[in-house]
Amino acid sequence: MSEVTKVKILTSATALFQRQGYHGTSVRDIAQDASVNIALVSYYFGGKKGLFETLLIQFYEGYIKELDKESSLNEYDSAYDCLLSFVRSLINYQRSQHLLARMVHREMSVDSTLVREVMATYLQKEKHEFSRLIKHGMAVGEFRRQPVDFVIIQLRSMITLPFMSPQYLWELFQLNPKEPYFIDRYMDHLKAWIASGLSSDPSSHVQAKPHIRIKQMY
């Protein structure tokens, strides 16, 4: 029963935090929405702060697991294919956790000790994975040489914005990032963007090269 109660609290907190923000949500709001005794929030999570930290870490543990899963696949036709796999996995993960993703991305824009710790732990890992792959693509001549930091900034913005600002997409473009049709169209666009923005031969959308063991090249 305790696991069921914890899941109910986490689910309610996610919905309320993403709708009202961390500071706009009280422990009483969460307990009432979850239909549990208010004392259980402190009992299981140590209060609102502990509950928020649990959600933040839960999201990024899953996020990084997607990167690790792709990194463990050690053969790719090209760095382009590998990068697309990274992007597709992260987008699908956020879609599956769209309420939590919106809450996390929004709260990560506010400076705090917790946010700095998360950046140093999880987002540093994300930066490392993208950086080593992009640098590899440049080293073997598959990607054009350009500032890696700006490539990562652009790429990450395209990966996260639909889930950070879904209201913007819906109100102005009638696009819903939760729907499969959006993911399919968006991935087609990202494929073209990566090919034109990174590929040394955009017209071919990166011709297949002999199998390269990416992990051994770094």
Image (cartoon, rainbow, N blue to C red):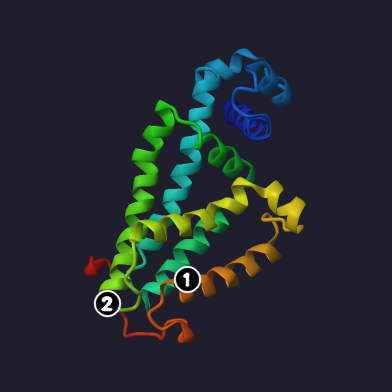
Quarter that holds the N terminus: top right
The residue type indicated by label 2 comes to Val
Q: Is residue 48 above or below residue 100?
A: above
Q: First in sequence, mark 1 or 2: give its number.
A: 2
Name the residue located 23 percent from the left edge and 65 percent from the top edge.
218
Q: Position of residue 122 (x, y in %)?
A: 38, 43
Element type at mark 1? helix
Where is mark 1, residue-wise? 194
The residue positioned farthest toward the top in the image shown: 39
Name the residue located 52 percent from the left edge and 71 percent from the top edge.
193
Q: Is residue 171 above or below residue 185?
A: above
Q: Is residue 64 visible?
A: yes
Q: Position of residue 164 (x, y in %)?
A: 60, 46
Q: Is residue 97 visible?
A: no
The residue type indicated by label 1 comes to Ile
Q: Is residue 74 left or right of residue 47?
A: left
Q: Which residue occupies the foreground of this view, 61 or 157?
A: 157
Where is mark 2, residue-wise? 140
Q: Position of residue 14 (x, y in %)?
A: 62, 34
Q: Position of residue 60 (x, y in %)?
A: 46, 43
Element type at mark 2? loop
Distance from disc 1 to disc 2, alpha carbons, whole Å, reads 16 Å
Name the residue located 54 percent from the left edge and 52 percent from the top edge.
160
Badge 2, how many Cα within 10 Å: few under 14, some, many 20+? few
Q: Which residue occupies the foreground of this view, 150 or 2?
A: 150
Q: Is residue 150 above or below residue 11?
A: below
